[in-house]
Image (cartoon, rainbow, N blue to C red):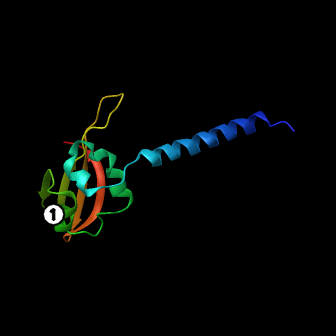
Amino acid sequence: MQIKRNDKIGAFFFVAFIISMSLIWLFEERFDKDRWRSEPLTRYKMVNDIIEQDLLIGKTKDEVIVLLGKPNSSISEEKDLFFYKLGQQPSFFEPKREQLLIVFKHQEVVEVAIVPEQ
């Protein structure tokens, strides 16, 4: 029995998807407290793990500082905000600088996001 052309195309894209997801998982770095502190220019490699694993949600400011170190900047008005610079990702296009935003409410982390550096 001969495999139809559409089946071949579908199989090709399925295999390509599996390979690309495996490579992403393989090269995405897990959060490491010591590397976060000692290599601030490569934090962009670990930031997705922090967000995806909800590592900071529910933590206090002191707990965040113990884990990530002192923030690069902070704002304290109606909401408390911490900002951590992530370094610059290699890119073929104009590089964009991003930072980790941590939002506190009632002294606990309620939101963590990546935002453009200001």
- Which of these two is toward me, 107 or 21? 21
Q: Residues within 10 Å of mark 1 (few under 14, many from 20)?
A: few
Give the quadrant of residue 42.
Answer: top left
- Which of these two is toward me, 15 or 35? 35
Assign a secondary structure to mark 1.
Answer: loop
Q: Mark 1: which amino acid?
A: Glu
**Which quarter of the figure is the C terminus placed in?**
top left
Give the quadrant of residue 103.
Answer: bottom left
Give x and y (percent) for residue 3. 80, 37
Q: Is residue 106 left or right of residue 91?
A: left
Give x and y (percent) for residue 20. 52, 42
Q: Is residue 61 left or right of residue 30?
A: left
Q: Residue drawn at (28%, 36%), measured in percent from left and top? A: 96
- Which of these two is toward me, 76 or 14? 14
Is any atom of residue 49 visible in this view?
Answer: yes
Total marks in image: 1
* Residue carrying label 1: 78
